[in-house]
Image (cartoon, rainbow, N blue to C red):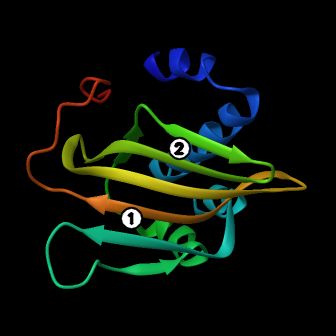
């Protein structure tokens, strides 16, 4: 409900950007690699930025990310709130706090930074960078995740 109210304040183009990212989260929850692949540009990259350690963390192509989804064990849920969206023609970015849950337990939180490009078939995700914070996560304004 909260996301729906927020979307009403966005332009139609910004709403499409948020919708594309939400569809990726939905594909993740469904372990649906094909759906994730349809939303992304295969050669785009995913970068994990860890809060600790000498190096930021792992990276992969978006194609590899989509291929891994069916192999993930357990129930996963990623939720974002208060997304900030910038659109310039056929290029967009989304920046949003998120939390991540596995089997009903929050495992981490952070910031998602998602780059998108508009193609003939609509907005496609061309890159994702996200931080991983495992301690001191704020309480989500979305409340507890659904059971």
In front of the other: 14 or 139: 14
Residue density around tag 1, few if under 14, some if 14–19, many if 20 or more, within 10 Å = few
User: Hey, which residue is sitting farthest left in the picture?
Assistant: 135
In front of the other: 71 or 50: 50
Seen at 48% across and 53% down, the residue is: 28
Which quadrant would residue 140 be assigned to in this image?
A: top left
Q: Quadrant of the C terminus?
A: top left
Q: Is residue 30 shown left or right of residue 120?
A: left
Which quadrant would residue 48 be assigned to in this image?
A: bottom left
Residue 113 at least partly seen = yes
Residue density around tag 2, few if under 14, some if 14–19, many if 20 or more, within 10 Å = some
User: Hey, which residue is sitting farthest bottom in the picture?
Assistant: 54
Residue labelled with disc 2: 26
Residue 7: give x, y in percent of width and height.
Answer: 59, 23
Residue labelled with disc 1: 72
Residue 31 at least partly seen = no
Seen at 34% across and 43% down, the residue is: 98
Contact, mark 1 vs mark 2 (Cβ under 8 Å): no
Distance from the alpha carbon under mark 1 to that under mark 2? 14 Å
Seen at 72% across and 59% down, the residue is: 38
Residue 44: give x, y in percent of width and height.
Answer: 62, 74
User: Hey, which residue is sitting farthest front in the picture?
Assistant: 88
Residue 49: give x, y in percent of width and height.
Answer: 31, 69
In front of the other: 86 or 71: 86
Q: Is residue 20 shown left or right of residue 94?
A: right
Q: Is residue 57 above or below residue 99?
A: below
Sequence order check, earlier mark of 1 and 2: 2
Q: Is residue 69 shown left or right of residue 39?
A: left
Numbered disc 1: secondary structure: loop
Q: Nearer the viewer, mark 1 or mark 2?
A: 2
Q: Is residue 23 above or below residue 12?
A: below
Numbered disc 2: secondary structure: helix
């Amino acid at each position: 409900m909260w996301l729906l109210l927020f979307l009403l304040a966005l332009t139609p183009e910004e709403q499409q950007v948020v919708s594309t990212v939400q569809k990726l989260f939905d594909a993740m929850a469904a372990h649906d690699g094909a759906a994730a692949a349809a939303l992304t540009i295969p050669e785009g990259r995913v970068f994990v930025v860890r809060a600790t350690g000498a190096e930021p963390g792992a990276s992969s192509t978006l194609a590899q990310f989509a291929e891994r989804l069916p192999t993930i064990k357990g129930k996963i849920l990623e939720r974002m709130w208060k997304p900030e969206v910038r659109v310039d023609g056929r290029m967009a970015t989304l920046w949003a706090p998120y939390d991540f849950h596995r089997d009903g337990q929050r495992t981490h939180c952070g910031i998602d930074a998602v780059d998108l490009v508009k193609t003939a078939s609509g907005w496609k995700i061309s890159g994702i960078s996200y931080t991983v914070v495992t301690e001191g996560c704020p309480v989500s304004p979305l409340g507890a995740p659904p059971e």
